Amino acid sequence: MNDTERGIADRLHSAAIHLLRHVRTEDAESGLTASRLSALSVIVFGGPISISDLAAAEQVRPPTISRLAKEMGWEGLVRRERDSTDRRIVRLRATAKGRQLLLEGRERRIAKLAQRVAELPPEDRERLSDAASALERLFLAADHDGAGP
Amino acid sequence: MNDTERGIADRLHSAAIHLLRHVRTEDAESGLTASRLSALSVIVFGGPISISDLAAAEQVRPPTISRLAKEMGWEGLVRRERDSTDRRIVRLRATAKGRQLLLEGRERRIAKLAQRVAELPPEDRERLSDAASALERLFLAADHDGAGP
DNA sequence: ACAACTATTTAGCATAGCTAAGGTAATAAA
DNA sequence: TTTATTACCTTAGCTATGCTAAATAGTTGT
């Protein structure tokens, strides 16, 4: 098709918006809010993480995560642990409950999307499969998933 | 590569999250909040739209849009127009200012993404270009862009 | 006319973002 | 070692944006 970089970027951007809007409808099921799901995803897939680092990953300010972490602690989604060598640092670790809720929610998202993929003509599935690694390379330097809106 | 539907869905999902997280960093520049940008995008690209229809497109409840529309009116981003045949209906139409702010913001997003695309090896760009139309077909039935988080 | 339905708004509440400022721990410098 | 600075987190208070329930206004059907 010999698309320009601008053209490719434009179409990928639109597709990403539609894709996430489509899967987001499953999130209510989990009983967790979008910000909790997103933060939990970073913690589950990336392992224990400090308040500041999680704030950076989520593109919000530390006080926002500080409060979120407190609430998610009350709700039994994460455990708060003090770093033993630097006691200023609070590390957040997913509990079994938090991990399970997140994984179930993610499964629902992926399943809904997979259903759409399955409805595509085979040659389209082929193209997407071929493009998947290229898409991953687009953001190699980037941080982790984070369930995303 | 012979990926399963589940595998393809999973990788597309991750890629979409990374992609939008990447471009979202440009949005502060516009001086508009995420909800305003998203609503404005639906209005600019889809044309005048009622409160209820916009609420459906944005996946929020009508009162949320009602208030947003009022504020965006004050801010000179949209005009509120009563439908002449059914005077219950309020149609929102982008002002020149609203349209310009939105298009500039979108340009910044696309440009940032295009830069990443340009850094890929040529065969990856080729694959993405090939996949773009397949991605569009994934959500044919779906509603409009809407700037998306 | 009037009952029922539809579109929007108002009111009141919860969540989640921000900045500013405070507390405590670690580190650098005198 | 004492002092000053820096780093990490929290608290307090504000704004924006989501929700539900209920009110208002316009339309439609009997």
Image (tube, coloured by chain):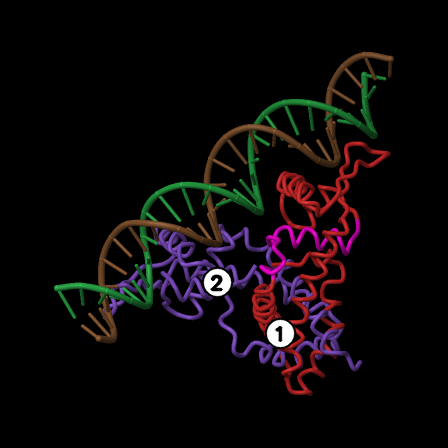
Chain colours: A red, B purple, C green, D brown
Residue depth check, mark 1 versus mark 2: number of the one nearer the observer:
2
Q: Is residue A68 above or below residue A26?
A: above
Q: Is residue A133 magenta?
A: no
**Label 2: element kind:** helix
Image position of B20 (left or right of D17): right
Q: Picture quarter containing residue B25?
A: bottom right
> What residue is pinned by disc 2?
B58
**Label 1: element kind:** helix
Image position of B137 (left or right of A127): left
Q: Is residue B105 visible?
A: yes
Q: Mark 1: give few (<14), some (14-19) or many (20+) Cα within 10 Å.
A: many
Name the foreground residue: B134 vs B98: B134
Label for residue A58? none
Q: Is residue A34 magenta?
A: yes
Name the foreground residue: B47 vs C14: C14
Name the foreground residue: A19 vs B77: A19
**Magenta-colored span:** A27-47
Task: Give the main secondary structure of the magenta stretch.
Answer: helix
Residue found 58% across the figure and 59% down from its top: A28
Q: Is residue B32 visible?
A: no
Label for residue A8? 1
Q: Is residue A27 above or below residue B137?
A: above
Residue A128, percent across and down? Answer: 69, 78
Q: Is residue A16 above or below residue A96?
A: below
